[in-house]
Image (spheres, helix red, strand yellow):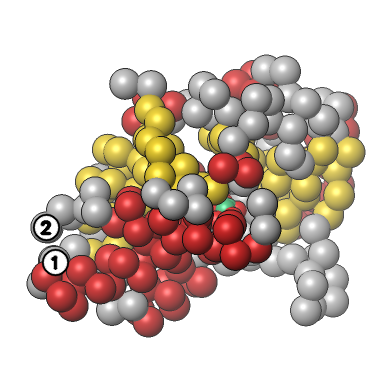
Amino acid sequence: MNTSAQAASKQNAGYRSAEEVGDGMIVGLGTGSTVFFAMERLGARIREEGLSIAGVPTSYQAAIRARRYGIPLTSLDEHPGLDIAIDGADQVDPALRLIKGRGAAHLREKCVCDAAERVLIVVDRTKMVETLDAPVPVEVLPFAVETVSRRLAALGADPVLREGVKKDGPVVTDNGNFIVDCSFGAIGDPDRLEAEIASIPGALECGLFTTYTEKITVIIGEEKGCSVVSLR
Ligand SMILES: O=C[C@H](O)[C@H](O)[C@H](O)COP(=O)(O)O
């Protein structure tokens, strides 16, 4: 898919997801280039229709964007139950299991996904795969990065500490932790792998999302229009 087709697909998915948001809703705001289109459209609905919502941002980047688009912000402390969350993904399989975290925001994104009644995942078609096989990001307590990396290697990964692009040294997340990217190749049993990673002390959260499939709706943006997939 060329860049302009991909941008149009992301925009169509993002804009479509914003139409699912109703007056008075508390909305989880994911991080990434696709969900920013949803925020842009939500901002327009606030200005043009007087839509009244508040968003819970999953990162500094999401908060900055939301403010720019005029979306009032709140927190999980004030709203531990969210009506809906809108987020992107790096890969989606036919059972609607996800890999997330290219932007290192998956820890807060998982908290928001867990708190939401419905979750809209906005992607372009390149994210839809038969088998999850992208590297799985793991947010790791810096104190335990070596022990966690050993345990991840024992699970079959090739763990790589994520380095900054415009920063020397490791990426430090919005929560003050490191990211270890783990290539497992094709992941035969994502549910089990997520549970195994969750059992490692110091592995704070991984980018596999396997337990929310029943409340997820995937909006797949196309160059023209969208298709919508859910298990319900
Ligand atoms: O940490 C980042 C998030 O999980 C993103 O939602 C994910 O990486 C997708 O981002 P994008 O929509 O830019 O492809």
| Residue 23 numbered tag | 2
Circle 1 residue: 51
Which of the 4 image quarters holds residue 229?
A: top left
Q: Residue at x 74, y 66 (%)?
A: 171
* Badge 1 residue CB within 8 Å of ligand 1: no
When the figure is inspected, residue 1 is found, relative to residue 116, above or below; the finding is: below
Q: Please report contact status of discs 2 and 1: CB closer than 8 Å, yes or no.
A: yes
Residue sitting nearer the eye, 143 or 16: 16
Residue 111 rendering spot, x and y as whole percentages: 44, 46
Indicate which quadrant contains ligand 1.
bottom right
The amino acid on which the numbered mark 1 sits, given as a three-letter code, is Leu
Say whether residue 3 is visible.
yes
Residue sitting nearer the eye, 186 or 205: 186
Reading the chain from its start, which is encountered first: label 2 or label 1? Answer: 2
Q: Secondary structure at mark 1?
A: loop
Residue 60 rendering spot, x and y as whole percentages: 50, 71
The amino acid on which the numbered mark 2 sits, given as a three-letter code, is Asp
Q: Secondary structure at mark 2?
A: loop
Is residue 119 left or right of 144 when viewed as pictured?
Answer: left
Q: Residue at x 52, y 22 (%)?
A: 95
Q: Residue at x 10, y 72 (%)?
A: 50
In the displayed orientation, state which residue is furthest to the front. Answer: 224
